[in-house]
Amino acid sequence: MHNRPQHFHAQAETALANAELRANFRGAMDYLRDKRKTAFADADEERTIRDRAEAIRQRCLSKLPELLEQLESNCIANGIRVHWAENADQANAIFTDIIQSHGGTLAVKGKSMVSEEIELNHAMEKEGITCLESDMGEYIVQLGQETPSHIIMPAIHKNKRQVAELFTEHVPGFQHTLDVDTLIQTGRNVLREKYRTADVGVSGVNFAVAETGTLCLVENEGNGRMCTTVPEVHIAITGIEKVVEFLADVPPLFSALTRSATGQLVTTYFNMISGPRKENELDGPKEVHLVLLDNGRSQAFADEEMRKTLQCIRCGACMNHCPVYTRIGGHAYGTVYPGPIGKIISPHLMGLEATQDLPTASSLCGACGEVCPVRIPIPELLQRLRHEAKQDPKPGTAPMRGQKAAASNAEAFVWRSFALITSRPVLYRMLTWCATRFRRLIPNKLGPWTRCRTAPKPAARTLRELMAERNK
Amino acid sequence: MSTARTAILDRLRRVNARPLPVKNPDYPIWTSTDREDMLVRLTELLEQNHAEVTRLPRAGLVAALRERVSGAGLKRLATGTGGEFFEEITQALQGTAEQLCFDQPLEQWKDELFNHVDAGITGCHGAIAATGSLVLWPGPAEPRTLSLVPPCHIAILKASTLHANLPAMMTEQGWGRGMPTNLLLVSGPSKTADIQQTLAYGAHGPKELVVLILEDA
């Protein structure tokens, strides 16, 4: 049973109590933060690259419908088939149709968070299709029947001992070792056999270029190239927000992405796919499909402030710098996208009913906003979502999915009473008089408030009384 | 799902977002016009990323290839069927190792390419000094999997095709006007740090990347 955002509080507590998990995350986050710090020469360089990346993302989003149409027509001209999906069910139906029309039973998949979003692996399993994760981290996570706990390093919650145990259990012939090279070789050998025999390759998309109909993929391992090159059919899936206007928009975003994510100047591979194998070519997929998924993104798009959520280029820097994520890890959130970006995108994907606790899981320290390469104002958006979870929408704006889901009658009553008391002097004086005179009657335990705080004790006299005394 | 298409686009249009003009604030990017400067940077970065780099004159290509192949004990090498260096490659492999020309669709010799080939040799379309990246432009004469499937990739690069950075190369060559089916930047052998942040090479693709830079070509 996977974690769910509805049980965030309980999951966070369990995670906090797990010393090994906390050590794994602590080590990984320190490592990634250091790497990012050294990737930028100085603060000026960091600022200017963020200026550029932010400007590109905002411009491209401002033209989103036009760019999607341009992308579609250029992809079609290149021989790529384009599909649109409103939600997970529609996207999975598209996958099923394509794979079954080729009689396929095995798909190999490169890293794609959008495919996690639609739970592609489970949906394909129901149709009798095996969908195998090929990113080393994802492969480990899939063996353990888990979900990724980080969007860049999916198996970051595991140490090598835990990986070795998983391999011992699941990979026939594996000789137990803690040597990371041997562990990677083990994964390599299993997966190479699968690339060779798979009917279909699946990938995500980092940037989809409207100008040329090109799908860009960023990776280090080469599994993305394998999945998009060796099988006869390649299906790419992406959220509708990933489109960029020009090919020239790609280099600054690519640079911002790799440096923010893993502190690399560049990744080992940058793969630009602009069509299936041509008649005179000898390899590459014979069919390339692109699935454009909405799944709540158009809701975020509708509001100018929330639209900034869609600027995200999925670098994970916000997670690496979040004091909450660093301590509880990715699984506690119970959402596909964990950490700060997860807290602001998940309400659009899943509705506020399910995700109402997430925006409150932040100290609003601002670290996430400070490192975001495209300057998404995450702390402001968190506050906005806290508001939307409790209140009616602003007049003239459409309600969010699950608007007001966290509203509580008791809380509303408290606020109304507070307003009443503080706006009526007689009532206010009466109450403060009672509070000071009967202060010893206030219990020492006040529910969750006193779990880590002492109960407040009113003073013996109100300030007003003390002042009156002094001025006598 | 054309109904999905209409519904999504309608929802996005209804918002009436104001299209922002193209404004691209400047950002610093490594640049140079000096060839030696670029060569040094390219070599340094490639080596940092675990590639093996040799600079040599074009006349030395055959000998260098031969030395590399026999020195590393490579027995079966996949090559293209054409390309600028095809003759030199063929000459170098004669009597040194077995040459397997990629002259049939992948499906017909997938098993062999995956399991019985020691290295693949390709030329490069160019390279980018700023990030230490080779640019590969696979085509019928040198297919995509040559640089991907064999455990060792030998890449031959002409120093004259080196560019300072990616935006410069894109603009100078007009990539925006049209792209090949697959274009690649390669900046080292395949690697991963997915297990406890420990770097390991040869995750899925080549474990070794050998770059021969022809300085006078």
Image (cartoon, coloured by chain):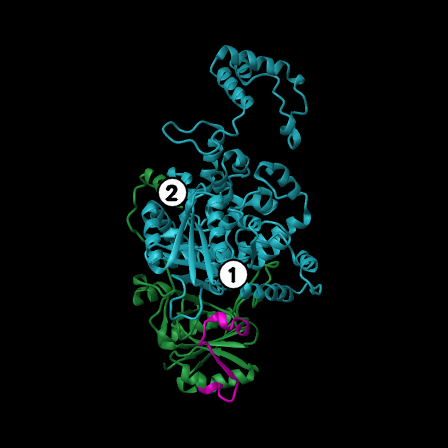
Q: How many marks?
A: 2
Read off the residue under disc 1.
A199
Q: Classify the position of the N terminus of chain A by image quarter.
A: top right
Residue B57 in sight: no
Q: Which residues are magenta?
A: B91-113
Q: Colour of chain B?
A: green
Distance between the alpha carbons at the discs numbered 1 and 2: 29 Å
Relative to A464, residue A402 above or below: below
Task: Residue A422 in the image: state x and y as whole percent.
Answer: 49, 17
SS under mark 2: helix
Q: Which chain is cyan?
A: A
SS under mark 1: loop
Type of amino acid under label 2:
Thr
In this rendering, position of residue A33 left or right of residue A11: left
Which is more toward the observer, A454 or B64? B64
Q: Chain of mark 1?
A: A
Mark 1, residues whose alpha carbon is within 10 Å: few (<14), some, or many (≥20)?
Answer: many
**Image point (62%, 17%), residue name:** A460
Read off the residue under disc 2.
B3
Task: Residue B92 in the image: state x and y as whole percent.
Answer: 47, 86
Task: Check residue A266 in the rendering and tell me which mark sits there, or answer none.
Answer: none
Q: Chain of mark 2?
A: B
Any magenta on residue A329?
A: no
**Image point (30%, 46%), residue name:** B20
Task: Residue B83 in the image: state x and y as whole percent.
Answer: 39, 78
Any magenta on residue B109?
A: yes
Residue A10: quarter of image: top right
Q: Are marks 1 and 2 on the same chain?
A: no
Residue B115 in sight: yes
Type of amino acid under label 1:
Asp
